[in-house]
Image: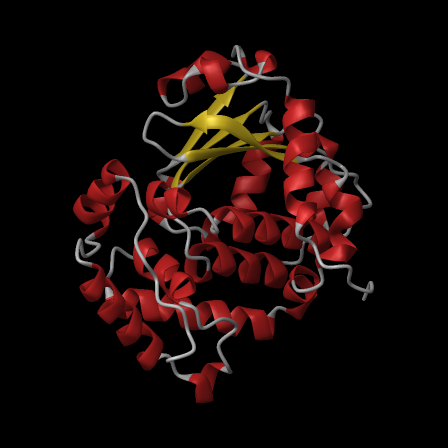
Amino acid sequence: MSCIKRYECTLSPKLLEKAVKELNEPRDNEKRLQAIDELRNNYDAEKFGPLVREDDEFFLRFLRAKKFNQKKALTVLQNYHNVKKEFKEVFGKVNNPAVLTPIIEKEVMMMLPGVAKNGAAVMLSRHGLIDKDMDIYDFMAYGVFSMEKLLEDEAIQINGIATIKDLENFNMTFFTKISPLALGKMTKVWQEAMPMRYKESHVVNEGTFYDVIMAIVRPFLKKKLLDRIHLHGTNFKGIHEFIDPSILPPYLDGTGPDPDGLAKLWGETLMEDMPQDTAL
């Protein structure tokens, strides 16, 4: 422990207040460090393998995701390590992100400039840009890699994430390649193993095929997550209730930046710290 640099709180007063009130985060840093140490010490390395990271910041994201409930945070932490071992098809690529360069260059995902009305960061994904021949595990790894990047930001750990999924021109052939086993595993990753606060999900241009997708996915989703899904079809103004149009791209009836520029910027963000790995 002596070689580990301890966490020092640099949150703005407003963000700290939100963490204290909404996430039960200790205002006092010594008590925060005690909570981190408790989580670290309770981790079962014999059962779930060695910790992938041991710095305070790593444990803190799990505590925040579960409002400093030690039991729940420990479950997610151990699930996180478990899926890394059990779902090599995805996490082998997350751990070797150079292989994800082609899909990153497709510019499917992007972060909008600003936050939703509830303070959550907003990620827009244009699923119509997914090639029907794309490896499904590449796409899953791309999503996990993006979320890992987002979790580096303490504001996002505290405020959470909102998503907008644009399904215009989405090719159902891609979705049908997902086996029920893989779908179940991936759903478990998002719901039980990622220390992220999912605030809301908006779906646009979903079309009638969305019912087919949901019929397959619904059994794997918890009611809490299902309740946070909002369908908008082509009525983009419905999103404005949740997200100010000033940060939405013009094609979603917003006055924000062009999505292509945002997608390029997000791709550069993902690749800027990418190690020069050898492809698997």
129 horizontally vs 3: left or right: right
Residue at image x 38%, y 35%? 120
Question: Is 198 drawn above or below residue 85 in the view shown?
Answer: above
251 horizontally vs 275: left or right: left
- Quadrant where the C terminus lies? bottom right
Residue at image x 17%, y 45%? 21
Q: Could you tell me residue 228's position as x and y percent?
A: 37, 37
Whether residue 13 is visible to the viewer of this picture, yes or no, is: yes
Whether residue 168 is visible to the viewer of this picture, yes or no, is: no
Question: Is 101 drawn above or below residue 96 in the view shown?
Answer: above
Question: Is 146 drawn above or below residue 110 in the view shown?
Answer: below
- Quadrant where the N terminus lies? bottom left
Q: Quadrant of residue 85?
A: bottom right
Question: Is 258 drawn above or below residue 199 in the view shown?
Answer: above
- The residue nearer to you, when weighing 100 against 228, is 100
231 horizontally vs 17: left or right: right
- The residue nearer to you, when weighing 253 against 226, is 253
Residue at image x 65%, y 45%? 270
Q: Could you tell me residue 56's position as x and y percent?
A: 38, 66
- The residue nearer to you, when weighing 18 against 229, is 18
Q: Could you tell me residue 167's position as x and y percent?
A: 62, 29
Q: Could you tell me residue 155's position as x and y percent?
A: 38, 42
